[in-house]
Amino acid sequence: MGLPLLPTISTIFIIFSAILVAIGWNLIRQKKIAAHKKTMIAAAVFAVLFLIIYISRTVLIGNTAFGGPDELKIYYTVFLIFHIILATTGAVLGVITINAGLKNNLVRHRKIGPVASVIWFFTAITGVAVYLLLYVFYKGGETTSVFKAILGI
Protein backbone atom coordinates (compact mmCIF):
# COMPACT_ATOMS: atom_id res chain seq x y z
CA MET A 1 0.00 0.00 0.00
CA GLY A 2 1.55 3.40 -0.83
CA LEU A 3 1.29 6.68 0.95
CA PRO A 4 -2.22 8.13 1.31
CA LEU A 5 -2.95 10.67 -1.42
CA LEU A 6 -4.74 13.50 0.40
CA PRO A 7 -2.51 13.64 3.51
CA THR A 8 0.56 13.52 1.25
CA ILE A 9 -0.69 16.36 -0.93
CA SER A 10 -1.74 18.49 2.04
CA THR A 11 1.64 17.96 3.73
CA ILE A 12 3.41 19.01 0.53
CA PHE A 13 1.26 22.17 0.49
CA ILE A 14 2.35 23.07 4.03
CA ILE A 15 6.00 22.49 3.09
CA PHE A 16 5.58 24.76 0.06
CA SER A 17 3.89 27.35 2.26
CA ALA A 18 6.77 27.38 4.75
CA ILE A 19 9.38 27.56 1.97
CA LEU A 20 7.54 30.50 0.43
CA VAL A 21 7.38 32.25 3.81
CA ALA A 22 11.17 31.85 4.10
CA ILE A 23 11.64 33.22 0.58
CA GLY A 24 9.25 36.09 1.35
CA TRP A 25 11.15 36.91 4.52
CA ASN A 26 14.38 37.03 2.53
CA LEU A 27 12.79 39.22 -0.15
CA ILE A 28 11.62 41.82 2.36
CA ARG A 29 15.09 41.92 3.92
CA GLN A 30 16.29 42.86 0.42
CA LYS A 31 13.56 45.56 0.23
CA LYS A 32 11.84 43.76 -2.68
CA ILE A 33 8.37 44.71 -1.52
CA ALA A 34 6.34 43.65 -4.58
CA ALA A 35 8.05 40.25 -4.75
CA HIS A 36 7.59 39.83 -0.97
CA LYS A 37 3.87 40.54 -1.27
CA LYS A 38 3.36 38.06 -4.14
CA THR A 39 5.40 35.38 -2.40
CA MET A 40 3.57 35.74 0.91
CA ILE A 41 0.19 35.64 -0.83
CA ALA A 42 1.31 32.44 -2.59
CA ALA A 43 2.37 31.04 0.81
CA ALA A 44 -1.10 31.85 2.15
CA VAL A 45 -2.74 30.18 -0.85
CA PHE A 46 -0.81 26.95 -0.19
CA ALA A 47 -1.81 27.12 3.48
CA VAL A 48 -5.47 27.57 2.52
CA LEU A 49 -5.24 24.66 0.07
CA PHE A 50 -3.89 22.54 2.92
CA LEU A 51 -6.78 23.63 5.12
CA ILE A 52 -9.37 22.85 2.44
CA ILE A 53 -7.98 19.34 1.96
CA TYR A 54 -7.66 18.74 5.70
CA ILE A 55 -11.19 19.90 6.50
CA SER A 56 -12.69 18.04 3.51
CA ARG A 57 -10.93 14.85 4.50
CA THR A 58 -11.94 15.26 8.14
CA VAL A 59 -15.59 15.83 7.28
CA LEU A 60 -15.93 13.28 4.47
CA ILE A 61 -13.54 10.51 5.54
CA GLY A 62 -12.35 11.13 9.09
CA ASN A 63 -8.94 11.37 10.70
CA THR A 64 -6.26 8.73 11.02
CA ALA A 65 -5.54 7.57 14.55
CA PHE A 66 -1.96 6.88 15.65
CA GLY A 67 -1.06 3.34 14.65
CA GLY A 68 2.29 3.09 16.40
CA PRO A 69 3.13 1.30 19.64
CA ASP A 70 0.79 1.90 22.58
CA GLU A 71 3.67 3.07 24.77
CA LEU A 72 4.30 5.98 22.34
CA LYS A 73 0.64 7.03 22.04
CA ILE A 74 0.74 9.54 24.92
CA TYR A 75 3.86 11.20 23.51
CA TYR A 76 2.33 11.34 20.06
CA THR A 77 -0.89 12.83 21.49
CA VAL A 78 0.98 15.55 23.41
CA PHE A 79 3.05 16.31 20.30
CA LEU A 80 -0.09 16.43 18.12
CA ILE A 81 -1.85 18.81 20.51
CA PHE A 82 1.27 21.02 20.51
CA HIS A 83 1.19 20.98 16.69
CA ILE A 84 -2.52 21.88 16.62
CA ILE A 85 -1.93 24.81 18.99
CA LEU A 86 0.99 26.00 16.84
CA ALA A 87 -1.03 25.63 13.62
CA THR A 88 -4.02 27.48 15.01
CA THR A 89 -1.88 30.28 16.43
CA GLY A 90 0.17 30.51 13.24
CA ALA A 91 -2.94 30.63 11.06
CA VAL A 92 -4.58 33.38 13.14
CA LEU A 93 -1.38 35.43 13.25
CA GLY A 94 -0.88 34.81 9.53
CA VAL A 95 -4.32 36.18 8.69
CA ILE A 96 -3.72 39.22 10.92
CA THR A 97 -0.30 39.79 9.34
CA ILE A 98 -1.50 39.46 5.75
CA ASN A 99 -4.48 41.68 6.47
CA ALA A 100 -2.23 44.33 8.03
CA GLY A 101 0.15 44.16 5.06
CA LEU A 102 -2.65 44.46 2.51
CA LYS A 103 -4.11 47.44 4.39
CA ASN A 104 -0.63 49.00 4.53
CA ASN A 105 -0.64 48.91 8.34
CA LEU A 106 3.11 48.34 8.30
CA VAL A 107 3.66 48.91 12.01
CA ARG A 108 1.38 46.00 12.85
CA HIS A 109 2.62 43.94 9.89
CA ARG A 110 6.27 44.33 10.93
CA LYS A 111 5.47 43.57 14.56
CA ILE A 112 3.43 40.42 14.03
CA GLY A 113 4.92 39.11 10.77
CA PRO A 114 8.20 37.75 12.15
CA VAL A 115 6.42 36.02 15.03
CA ALA A 116 3.83 34.53 12.67
CA SER A 117 6.60 33.33 10.35
CA VAL A 118 8.57 31.57 13.08
CA ILE A 119 5.41 29.90 14.39
CA TRP A 120 4.57 28.86 10.82
CA PHE A 121 8.02 27.27 10.37
CA PHE A 122 7.49 25.23 13.54
CA THR A 123 3.98 24.36 12.39
CA ALA A 124 5.37 23.01 9.11
CA ILE A 125 8.11 21.04 10.86
CA THR A 126 5.76 19.50 13.41
CA GLY A 127 3.18 18.86 10.68
CA VAL A 128 5.71 16.88 8.67
CA ALA A 129 6.62 14.97 11.84
CA VAL A 130 2.94 14.11 12.43
CA TYR A 131 2.65 12.93 8.82
CA LEU A 132 5.77 10.78 9.18
CA LEU A 133 4.51 9.27 12.45
CA LEU A 134 1.08 8.53 11.00
CA TYR A 135 1.98 7.22 7.56
CA VAL A 136 5.69 6.51 7.15
CA PHE A 137 7.26 5.33 10.42
CA TYR A 138 4.13 3.46 11.52
CA LYS A 139 1.10 2.18 9.68
CA GLY A 140 -1.80 4.54 10.29
CA GLY A 141 -4.44 3.44 12.73
CA GLU A 142 -8.16 3.41 12.11
CA THR A 143 -9.90 6.25 10.33
CA THR A 144 -12.26 7.80 12.84
CA SER A 145 -13.65 11.05 14.20
CA VAL A 146 -11.26 13.91 14.87
CA PHE A 147 -11.69 13.68 18.65
CA LYS A 148 -11.13 9.93 18.74
CA ALA A 149 -8.12 10.22 16.41
CA ILE A 150 -6.51 12.93 18.57
CA LEU A 151 -7.56 11.96 22.08
CA GLY A 152 -8.58 8.33 21.72
CA ILE A 153 -12.12 9.09 22.95
Image: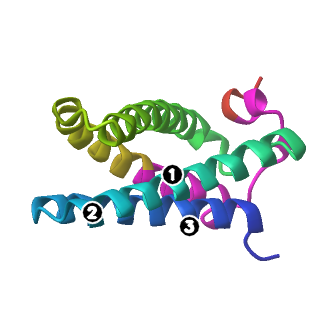
Q: In which quarter of the image is residue 114?
A: top left
Distance (Cα) linking label 2 and label 1: 29 Å
Numbered disc total: 3
Q: How many residues crowd mark 1 within 10 Å: few (<14), some (14–19), many (20+)?
A: many
* Magenta residue check for 37: no
- The secondary element bearing badge 2 is classed as helix
Task: Using the image as rendered, state which of residue 113 and residue 99 is in the foreground.
Answer: 99
Q: Can residue 67 be seen in this view?
A: no
Q: Disc 1 marks which residue? A: 127
State the CA–CA distance, disc 3 to disc 1.
Answer: 10 Å
Q: Are marks 2 and 1 in contact (CB under 8 Å)?
A: no
Q: Tell me where residue 88 appears, x and y as whole percent.
A: 49, 32
Q: Which residue is identified by label 3?
A: 12
Give, as a three-letter code, the residue at label 3. Ile
Depth-wise, is mark 2 or mark 1 nearer the camera?
A: 2
Residue pointed to by mark 2: 34
Measured as percent of width and height from the top left, residue 148 is found at 77, 29
Q: Quote the CA–CA distance across marks 2 and 3.
A: 25 Å
Amino acid type, callout 2: Ala
